[in-house]
Image (spheres, rainbow, N blue to C red):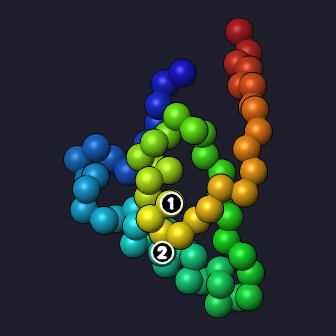
Amino acid sequence: MQRQAAVHADQRGRGLASQLVGALVRSIRARGETPFLHLTTENETAYRLYDALGFETRATFDVTALRAP
């Protein structure tokens, strides 16, 4: 499976994802809602980011991706 990133390689390490997710979390909480997300366990970079931002693993499950021929 090919890994995809939400931040271009040239822009990584500048805190852009942390700033963006932080702003979204604040906005969601300001509405009285609870932010949540999902990611694959193979995406270690995203996992570390979300862990540092205070997200906790609440559930795990298996997903099978199918691609049409």
Q: Is residue 62 above or below residue 10?
A: above
Q: Quadrant of the N terminus?
A: top right
In front of the other: 63 or 59: 59
Label for residue 4?
none
What's the residue at 28%, 52% (across, down)? 12
| Badge 2 density bin: few <14, some 14–19, many ≥20, Cα 10 Å | some
Residue assigned mark 1: 50
* Amino acid type for the residue under numbered disc 2: Gly
Position of residue 35 measured from the top left corner of the image (x, y, whole percent): 67, 71
In the displayed structure image, the side of residue 18 where residue 68 appears, left or right: right
Q: Which residue is at 56% across, 83% downward? A: 26
Mark 2 to mark 1 CA distance (whole Å)? 10 Å
* Element class at badge 2: helix
Rendered location of residue 28, percent (x, y): 65, 80
Of residues 58 and 11, the one drawn nearer to the viewer in this rendering: 58
Q: Residue at x 71, y 25 (%)?
A: 65
Question: Which residue type does callout 1 highlight?
Answer: Tyr
From the image, tell me which residue sits under label 2.
22
User: As drawn, is 30 to the left or to the right of 46?
Assistant: right
In the image, taking residue 69 as reference, residue 9 lies left or right, namely left
Q: Is residue 64 left or right of residue 28?
A: right
Label 1 environment density (alpha carbons within 10 Å; few <14, some 14–19, many ≥20):
many
Going from the N terminus, do you reach mark 2 or mark 1 first? 2
Q: Which one is closest to the eye, mark 2 or mark 1?
A: 1
The image shows residue 10 at horizontal and vertical percentages of: 23, 47
**Residue 6 makes an appearance in the image:** no
Residue 30, x across and y down, in percent? 64, 90
State the image quarter where residue 31 is shown: bottom right
